[in-house]
Image (cartoon, rainbow, N blue to C red):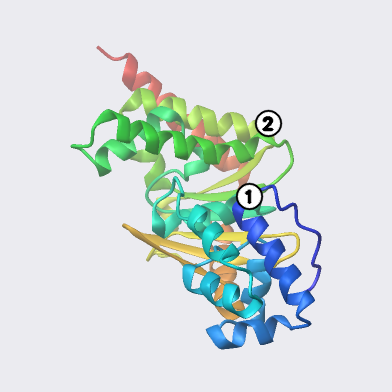
Amino acid sequence: MPGQKPLDPSSSPRAMLGSELRHQRNAANLTQEEVGRPLFLSASFIGQLESGLRRMQMEYALHFDKTFDTNGFFERHCQALKKSKYPDHFAEAAEAEAIAVVIKEYAQALIPGVLQTEAYARAVFRAYQPTAIEDVIDELIAARLDRAKLLKDPTRPMVWTVLDEAILRRPVGGPAVMAATLRHIARMIRQRRIIVQVLPFGAGAHASLEGTIQLLAFEDAPPLAYLQSLGSGQLLDDPASVARHELTYDLLRATALSPENSLALIESVAEDYEHAEQKP
């Protein structure tokens, strides 16, 4: 895997496991392909484990402990990875998102998590779980807002989002919540922290009618694509599949409004919501 750089084992459990795997593999004078073969894993996948990009599964941990005679090291620390604050189907994608240098996303039904306000997130989670106690909803919101911290860095990751116009028009949480959320997005656009385009209804049929796409690029690892549906998600690393979704995203960007016209539409819709809120 090209561009292997030193890991900071203290940065996360995955980084620690990846650093140790690389150390043990090099000490045993094995290639990534040789390590992955018994598990039917590609050399690229082993490289992603070593870089902390992919989540260590228990079956891998048990195999590595046996292969390298590490006295349960990988098994013990793999247990720590199970304590994610995210749902199982999204945990690996969220952890990869946190170390990506470029995040590109087409959102079809709701504002992406890293761009949501607390009130918008609360409305979303309450709709998902209408009978959940407030503490459960609060925990979900805290995890979602924690993802947004990656935008506190003024330059990275680069975030480029295409929002379907339906997202702007659906009053999640009511007019006041939508107005505040769209103003929040517009503020980040004007601060040049994010790039946003809106895919208008007038575009008609487009390249991703069947769902959302998230594309993640990294400094020292191949890109990934994440596809999500209700209660499930798939993180793809196959180069051909990722390339196909990259093309889909490029087609969406070409069909969407320009960033300038998108900002104007977002602010116009926010103003409409503000006026609606002021009506008696």
Residue at the spot x=58%, y=58% of the render? 253
Query: Is residue 155 left or right of 181 when viewed as pictured?
Result: right
Give the mark, 2 or 1, whose residue is nearer the N terminus. 1
Report the residue marked by disc 1: 12
Residue 127's x, y, as percent? Answer: 25, 40
Q: Amino acid at mark 2?
A: Gln
Residue 240's x, y, as percent? Answer: 59, 80
Q: Label 2 vs label 1: CA separation? A: 30 Å
Above or below residue 113? Residue 249 is below
Q: SS class of the residue under badge 1?
A: loop
Report the residue marked by disc 2: 191
Residue 26's x, y, as percent? Answer: 78, 75
Above or below residue 268? Residue 220 is below
In this rendering, does residue 209 appear at all?
A: yes
Residue at the spot x=60%, y=68% of the render? 71
Q: Amino acid at mark 1?
A: Ser
Residue at the spot x=66%, y=60% of the render? 217
Observer-nearest residue: 30 or 186? Answer: 30
In this rendering, does residue 204 appear at all?
A: no
Q: Locate the N terminus and report the quarter of the image it occupies.
A: bottom right
Mark 2 Cα within 10 Å, few/some/many (few <14, many 20+)?
few
Observer-nearest residue: 68 or 185? Answer: 68
As drawn, which residue projects farthest toward the left?
A: 131
Observer-nearest residue: 197 or 153? Answer: 153
Query: Comparing marks 2 and 1, which lies closer to the viewer?
Result: 1
Residue 153's x, y, as percent? Answer: 70, 37
Q: SS class of the residue under badge 2?
A: loop
Q: Locate the C terminus and report the quarter of the image it occupies.
A: top left
Is disc 2 in contact with disc 1, using a CB cutoff of under 8 Å?
no
Above or below residue 147? Residue 214 is below
